[in-house]
Image (cartoon, rainbow, N blue to C red):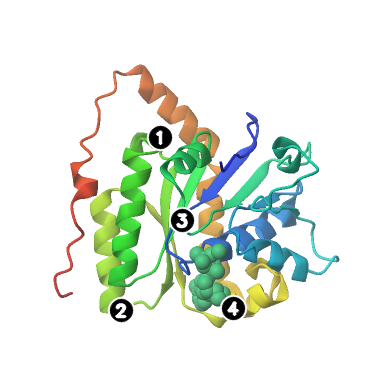
Amino acid sequence: MLITPRQDKLNKIIILNPKGGCGKSTLATNLAARYAQDGPIPALMDFDPQGSTIAWLNRRSQERPQIHGIAAFKKSMQATRSWQLRVPSDTVNVLVDSPASVSHDDLRELTRDATSILVPVLPSSMDIHAASRCIADLLLVAKIDRRDRKLAVVANRTRKNTKSFAKLMRFLDSLGIPIIAVLRDSQNFVYAAEKGLGLCEMQPSRVKQDVEQIEKIVEWLEAWPQRRRASTSAAAVKRQPLAPSSILRRPQFGSA
Ligand SMILES: Nc1ncnc2c1ncn2[C@@H]1O[C@H](COP(=O)(O)OP(=O)(O)O)[C@@H](O)[C@H]1O
Ligand SMILES: [Mg+2]
């Protein structure tokens, strides 16, 4: 069971998409480094048995702003599960990196009290298909209500002005789920991953464009209390169930 800490004050950000290589760990590590800059110490939970987020943290210099790593994929024999998964008492932001395959039960568990759910998506037909299934599961299995505005997509490794990018944007637009940032395909991400860095910690002139997009994500994430308030007051008005059919519609793959 993929259990995450339950505390009201926590800003729990789940990064999810069963498709390997779409950029989950890249997003988790870059956001953790960004939150670490301002403090308090963020927590980075790695549920992926590949452990690439924790490996990134192990490569990170001790001189860099601290991040509390939790190797949630490991089952500890000595500690209870809740002890193993505890976050430091003053931590506010928790980044949760998820594995490639997540059962329906785990999906519900992971997202239950998430403040935000980020789905990174790559611009290829296969990835668009995988993302549409992932988003359908979030809406239909985990019962994420779009009106709660917890769910957003990050388009990753994009090359603007390509057909596949245009197709990805059309598809995401058709779902009515916000695309909060567009990350380009850049060696900066690969370099940062190797060095245990976040892009925000690299030479600003080199990463300006990428950091701008990460800032857009942070801005959206930081607005979670307002999003929550807005959805709570909306709940006072009688909720009409949204027809899930649009999400289940197959993405259109006509030639772009
Ligand atoms: N925007 C990007 N530009 C270039 N390389 C990227 C980008 N995003 C991710 N990568 C690289 O793609 C690979 C897979 O990304 P990763 O974050 O590990 O995906 P996931 O965690 O979803 O499996 C990694 O080598 C990573 O450095
Ligand atoms: Mg990963």
Out of 77 and 85, give the one closest to the viewer.
Answer: 77
Q: Position of residue 86 (x, y in %)?
A: 73, 39
Out of 138 and 118, give the one closest to the viewer.
Answer: 138
- Identify the image quadrant of residue 143: top left
What residue does disc 3 label?
Answer: 101
| Ligand 1 is within 8 Å of the C-beta of the residue at disc 1 | no
What residue does disc 1 label?
Answer: 148
Amino acid bearing label 2 = Asn
Q: Secondary structure at mark 3?
A: loop
What residue does disc 2 label?
Answer: 161
| Ligand 1 is within 8 Å of the C-beta of the residue at disc 4 | yes
Q: Secondary structure at mark 1?
A: helix
Q: Which of disc 2 and disc 1 is earlier in sequence?
A: 1
Q: Secondary structure at mark 4?
A: helix
Observer-side mark, 2 or 4, equals 4
Amino acid bearing label 1 = Asp
Amino acid bearing label 4 = Val
Task: Look at the picture and state if 213 lies above or below 150.
Answer: below
Q: Which of disc 3 and disc 1 is earlier in sequence?
A: 3
Q: Position of residue 208 (x, y in %)?
A: 58, 73
Q: Position of residue 166 (x, y in %)?
A: 27, 71
Residue shown at 65% from the left, 62% from the top: 53
**Circle number at residue 190:** 4
- Identify the image quadrant of residue 36: bottom right
Q: Which of disc 4 and disc 2 is earlier in sequence?
A: 2
Count the marks: 4
Residue shown at 18% from the left, 51% from the top: 249
Q: CA distance from mark 4 to mark 1?
A: 34 Å
Q: CA distance from mark 1 to mark 3?
A: 25 Å
Q: Secondary structure at mark 2?
A: loop
